[in-house]
Image: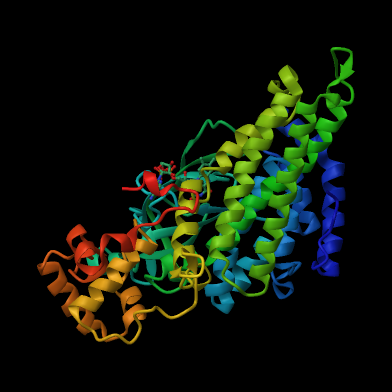
């Protein structure tokens, strides 16, 4: 798994080698912070000194300018150092994309060099007690007072709470119902630690992320200058969305690097564990399990860098980023569970890293948008993509006496637009697609005519009980099908019958 992908630039290949070495050199130290449950400050400082926090920051602001691909490379490798990877990730996600896209020159000068140097850690603050998956439902408010904004509210589940200096937050700047409907009620702000009224409320005891603080923060009349507003007032939702693809990708990639360590551990372990007078790697089930893990590791890695390339090419890979997030975290859980099974009892102890991966993977399936939300995005955006929604018509092929996907014109094309002919088209469709309705455009494609003419005929046929119309909320016909009366009126019974050649005539009735 030490492969570099051929499309990486020389700089990306170089950083890959370099960060790998850094990780190898610092494994043991990372373990010590885990065992002592200490935030790995010295290790975070080492990462900062190396400049890795600047992976996605342009060179003019002190970064390495390695794009989404470079950020992914660094996140995946640092993820092998557990807490360090999560801190790195969230710090990068705390406004980097948003400032790059929506920040003024002065804001870029003020914050990007700090992100790049890692001298300050950042936290991303979307979630609130009453706003989880429904991220637009924020209650934290920002009210303009002179040249300042005054913030009130709470954020929760914030990774890096307390240890971070910069908090990139989304607050409600309007209660207007119409603005809310258009997501125009949210604005993005940067809040620095130390502002009067800004405090840490709670640190969550969690299933995983053992030595990364995660908690609640409280804004009690916190005053910040208008300079700290990122993007226009009311444009917070767009600011949030603009960074999401990058965030999901990096948040997912952080898991993919450590799959390599699991595989390495499994080969080492199973070549040394003997049961029934054989090393356990000789059992087909164990080999099968390791093969599955290797497959998942390779697939998730390839998919992450595919998504990163799309981002670097200036695309908005909404579906791909959600898939990357979903598969990396699901695979992480499945890989960890499988690894534990292969390791047996040892896998359940904290002396081996499999149980820790399982706990972190479960977090991964919930953070940065739950995997159910990712599936919702994958479905909704794909449903709009022309690529997946090309017209596909089955037509009756007389040569084979069966329905086949066809680009040929309908046999009804050009007939007069009468009730009788429209009923024939709709009834014929029962022979081709017995359980499906037709869209009005399907009918129009088959027989021609204008939409309004067809709609009039549909309504007449419905009145006569010959078709059923399925309407949308506004009452517009969106689907039609023939009733049994309609089918009988359109064609004789034999028209709809179909039997395979081997079926005996004597058994027909
Ligand atoms: C360890 C950890 C770190 C985190 N770090 C941060 C951070 O740094 N910054 C930050 O802002 N937030 C952070 N979060 C919050 C995280 O993003 C949210 O927990 C997550 O978005 C889910 O919100 P929720 O927990 O309120 O669950 P809910 O939204 O209440 O969801 C509960 C269940 O309902 C399902 N559900 C909700 N809506 C739908 C829907 N429309 N369709 C189908 N299913 C749905 C969910 O999938 C889930 O199964 C973190 C959370 C954890 C646990």
Q: Residue 297: give x, y in percent of width and height.
A: 73, 45
Query: How is this picture coloured?
Result: rainbow
Instruction: Judge whether 60 appears above or below 429 on screen.
Output: below
Camera-side residue of 264 and 289? 289
Q: In the image, what residue occupies the spot 68% across and 45% down?
A: 255
Q: Looking at the image, in which quadrant does ligand 1 appear?
A: top left
Left or right: where does residue 233 sit relative to residue 115? left
Q: Closer to the camera, 221 or 118? A: 118
Q: Horizontal placement of 240 versus 355: left or right? A: left
Q: Residue at x 60, y 42 (%)?
A: 330
Residue 66's image quarter? bottom right
- Where residue 486 sits, quadrant-wise, is bottom left
Picture layout, residue 322 above or below residue 277: below
Taking 262 as reference, is 141 above or below it? Answer: below
Quadrant in which residue 332 is drawn = top right
x 69%, y 63%: residue: 306
Farthest-out residue, front: 506
Q: Position of residue 318 (x, y in %)?
A: 54, 64
Viewer can see residue 42: no
Count of labels in the image? 0
Front residue of 15/167: it is 15
Depth order, front residue of 410/263: 410
Locate residue 375, reporting x and y percent.
Answer: 49, 52
């Amino acid at each position: 798994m030490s492969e570099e992908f051929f499309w990486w630039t020389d700089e990306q290949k170089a950083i890959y080698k370099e960060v790998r070495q850094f990780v190898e050199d610092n494994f043991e130290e990372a373990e010590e912070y885990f065992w002592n449950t200490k935030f790995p400050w010295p290790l975070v400082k080492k990462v900062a000194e190396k400049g890795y926090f600047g992976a996605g920051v342009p060179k003019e602001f002190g970064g390495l300018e390695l794009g989404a691909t470079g950020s992914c490379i660094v996140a995946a490798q640092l993820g092998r150092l557990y807490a360090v990877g999560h801190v790195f990730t969230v710090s990068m996600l705390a406004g980097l994309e948003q400032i790059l896209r929506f920040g003024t020159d002065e804001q870029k000068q003020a914050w990007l060099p700090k992100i790049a140097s890692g001298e300050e850690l950042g936290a991303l603050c979307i979630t609130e007690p009453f706003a989880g998956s429904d991220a637009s439902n924020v209650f934290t408010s920002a009210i303009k007072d002179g040249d300042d904004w005054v913030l009130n509210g709470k954020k929760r589940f914030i990774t890096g709470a307390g240890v971070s200096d910069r908090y990139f937050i989304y607050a409600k700047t309007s209660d207007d119902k119409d603005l809310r409907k258009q997501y125009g009620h949210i604005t993005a702000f940067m809040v620095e630690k130390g502002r009067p009224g800004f405090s840490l409320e709670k640190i969550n005891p969690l299933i995983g992320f053992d030595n990364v603080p995660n908690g609640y923060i409280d804004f009690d009349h916190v005053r910040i200058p208008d300079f700290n507003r990122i993007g226009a007032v009311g444009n917070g939702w767009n600011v949030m969305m603009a960074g999401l693809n990058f965030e999901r990708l990096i948040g997912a990639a952080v898991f993919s690097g450590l799959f390599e360590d699991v595989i390495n551990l499994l080969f080492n372990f199973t070549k040394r564990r003997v049961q029934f007078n054989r090393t356990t790697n000789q059992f087909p089930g164990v080999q099968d399990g390791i093969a599955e893990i290797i497959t998942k590791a390779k697939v998730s890695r390839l998919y992450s860098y595919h998504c990163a390339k799309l981002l670097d090419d200036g695309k908005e890979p909404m579906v791909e980023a959600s898939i990357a997030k979903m598969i990396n975290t699901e695979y992480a859980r499945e890989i960890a569970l499988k690894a534990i099974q292969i390791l047996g009892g040892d896998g359940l102890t904290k002396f081996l890293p499999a149980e820790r991966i399982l706990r972190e993977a479960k977090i991964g399936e919930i953070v940065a948008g739950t995997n159910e939300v990712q599936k919702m995005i994958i479905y909704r955006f794909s449903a709009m993509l022309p690529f997946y929604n090309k017209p596909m018509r089955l037509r009756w092929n007389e040569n084979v006496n069966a329905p086949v996907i066809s680009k040929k014109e309908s046999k009804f094309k050009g007939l007069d637009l009468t009730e009788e002919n429209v009923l024939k088209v709709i009834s014929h469709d029962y022979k081709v697609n017995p359980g499906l309705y037709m869209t009005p455009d399907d009918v129009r494609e088959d027989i021609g005519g204008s939409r309004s003419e067809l709609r009039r005929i549909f309504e007449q046929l419905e009145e006569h009980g010959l078709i059923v119309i399925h309407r949308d909320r506004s009452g517009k016909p969106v689907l039609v099908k023939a009733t049994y009366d309609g089918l009988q009126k359109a064609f004789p019974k034999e028209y709809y019958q179909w039997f395979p050649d081997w079926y005996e005539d004597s058994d027909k009735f």
